[in-house]
């Protein structure tokens, strides 16, 4: 339970690095642990990371809460609001509710309806150009992760009007510039239960020139407010419920198994440079563990029935919980591999998604490598891998630590198969002959690959992809 996890955070550190006990369930240090994190630091050597930060948006949760958004923007004295959405949501109730609320509060606004599902550098630039032309003083995002991420990018580059797109994009694909001044107020209204983007400072897109997904990650991008209204997710088709829910699952797993924050590397010279994705930490762990348990129960119910409103509401909360967890702890290999899988997709079209361009939904592309990733990372922090496997339904009563990765992999395969997830990356048209190209696309994802509990090279990524060609 959350209360038990909170008590663990306050207890003395019992991680394997300190206790000498390899059976300890949790590998994180508590904030008060007087460890050797800093004792080797000197004037001539960088100080190892010794701190972590918790940044998240304010969230408002409630059925019908979207109707308050006009008052929120009036309270902010907004005079030029720019609302971002995609062509599908533009025709549905969530956008209508937002616009009606703005009108009631007499807040001037315009609506940008051309967000691309699974955005690209081109679609980001279109939104940025439109925002720079309109010059808003506040921004609203009504949609899924694609819309929220597009709105974040438009916000950033409206404030930094002279910046080019790659200036703030994560290195090495971009320049990785830090955001050093406040952005416009952004209110996010999610219409899917998956990305958790309403709580994070990340914006992900396809960089077409490199054939890879990348993004911008900075705490300054996080929305001022996320409005989590279960009414807004009731229009999700089944496959959107599935894909977005799988994203929540992997956010929780990866954040919970990421390298501990104090093992990430040297502390930054300036706290402004501390990355948003810091590694697992005692606070992120609480949110990720809770999200995992909610998803394991609610996702199958949500996928099975459009009328199970309790399951849908639970998934909206799980998405936010996981967003708080991974938004600070980070993700690693499942997401890292997904950026290549979806970025190089040339011929796969997923049902119930836009059919105007090849598209492998983000959550699907993340989940298909999860069994192989679990097999690879299971030797590091095996207790956590076994804990996740048990949550997913595995019997771990007589499990051995050395089998943790295989046990979790089997539990994930069974979970994915039961949900009807495509059978590995071969379902998207990939074969062994394309593994090298995928690896080349994945390797630049330093921001997430470095958070893997077990560090990887090209050969190991290739092996993960080869194991992911077929899952069942």
Image (cartoon, grey):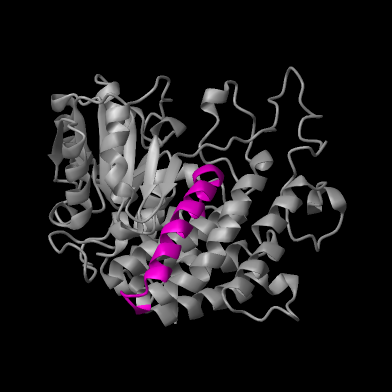
Instruction: Look at the picture and state if 99 lies above or below 158.
Output: below
Estimate the x, y position of residue 437 in percent, counting from the top left: 34, 56
Q: Nearer the viewer, residue 299 or 214?
A: 299
Residue occupying the point 42% across, 45% down: 60
Estimate the x, y position of residue 371 in percent, counting from the top left: 51, 70
Estimate the x, y position of residue 73 in percent, counting from the top left: 28, 32
Examine the image and state in which quarter residue 261 appears.
top right
Q: Nearer the viewer, residue 318 or 227?
A: 227
Estimate the x, y position of residue 259 in percent, counting from the top left: 63, 49
Residue occupying the point 55% across, 30% down: 274
Instruction: Look at the picture and state if 23 lies above or below 139.
Output: below
Q: Is residue 266 left or right of residue 429?
A: right
Over which residues does the magenta segment extend? 304-332
* Residue 408 visible in the snapshot: yes
Q: What is the magenta segment's predominant secondary structure?
A: helix
Q: Quadrant of the C terminus?
A: bottom left
* Residue 165 visible in the snapshot: no
Residue occupying the point 54% across, 56% down: 254
């Amino acid at each position: 339970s959350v209360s038990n996890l909170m008590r663990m955070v306050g207890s003395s550190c019992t991680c394997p690095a300190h206790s000498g006990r390899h059976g300890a369930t949790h590998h994180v240090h508590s904030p008060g642990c007087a460890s050797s994190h800093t004792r080797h630091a000197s004037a001539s050597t960088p100080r190892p990371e010794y701190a972590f930060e918790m940044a998240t948006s304010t969230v408002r949760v409630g059925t019908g809460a979207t109707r308050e958004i006009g008052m929120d923007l009036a309270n902010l004295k907004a005079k030029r609001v720019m609302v971002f959405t995609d062509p599908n949501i533009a025709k549905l109730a969530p956008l209508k509710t937002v616009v009606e609320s703005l009108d009631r509060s007499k807040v001037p606004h315009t609506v940008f309806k051309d967000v691309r599902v699974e955005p690209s550098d081109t679609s980001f630039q279109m939104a940025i150009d439109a925002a720079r032309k309109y010059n808003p003083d506040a921004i609203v995002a009504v949609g899924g992760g694609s819309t929220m991420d597009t709105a974040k990018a438009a916000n950033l580059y409206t404030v930094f009007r002279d910046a080019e797109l790659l200036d703030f994009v994560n290195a090495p694909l971009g320049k990785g510039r830090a955001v050093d001044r406040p952005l416009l107020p952004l209110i996010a209204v999610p219409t899917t239960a998956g990305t958790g983007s309403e709580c994070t400072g990340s914006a992900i897109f396809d960089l077409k020139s490199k054939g890879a997904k990348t993004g911008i990650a900075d705490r300054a991008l996080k929305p001022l407010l996320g409005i989590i209204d279960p009414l807004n997710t009731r229009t999700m088709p089944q496959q959107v419920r599935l894909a977005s829910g799988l994203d929540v699952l992997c956010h929780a797993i990866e954040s919970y198994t990421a390298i501990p924050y104090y093992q990430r590397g040297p502390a930054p010279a300036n706290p402004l440079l501390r990355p948003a994705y810091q590694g697992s930490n005692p606070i992120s762990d609480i949110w990720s563990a809770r999200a995992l348990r909610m998803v394991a129960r609610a996702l199958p119910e949500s996928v099975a029935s459009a009328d199970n409103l309790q399951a849908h509401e639970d998934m909206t909360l799980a998405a936010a919980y996981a967003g708080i967890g991974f938004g600070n702890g980070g993700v690693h290999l499942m997401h890292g591999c997904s950026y290549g899988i979806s970025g190089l997709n040339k011929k796969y079209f997923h049902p119930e998604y836009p059919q105007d361009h090849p598209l492998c939904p983000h959550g699907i592309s993340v989940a298909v490598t999860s069994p192989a990733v679990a097999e690879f990372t299971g030797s590091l922090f095996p207790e956590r891998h076994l804990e996740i496997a048990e949550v997913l339904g595995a019997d771990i009563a007589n499990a051995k630590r050395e089998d943790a990765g295989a046990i979790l992999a089997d539990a994930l395969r069974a979970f994915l198969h039961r949900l009807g997830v495509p059978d590995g990356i071969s379902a998207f048209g990939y074969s062994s002959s394309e593994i090298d190209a995928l690896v080349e696309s994945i390797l630049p994802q330093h921001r997430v690959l470095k958070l893997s509990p077990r560090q990887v090279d090209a050969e190991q990524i290739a092996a993960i992809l080869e194991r992911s060609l077929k899952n069942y």
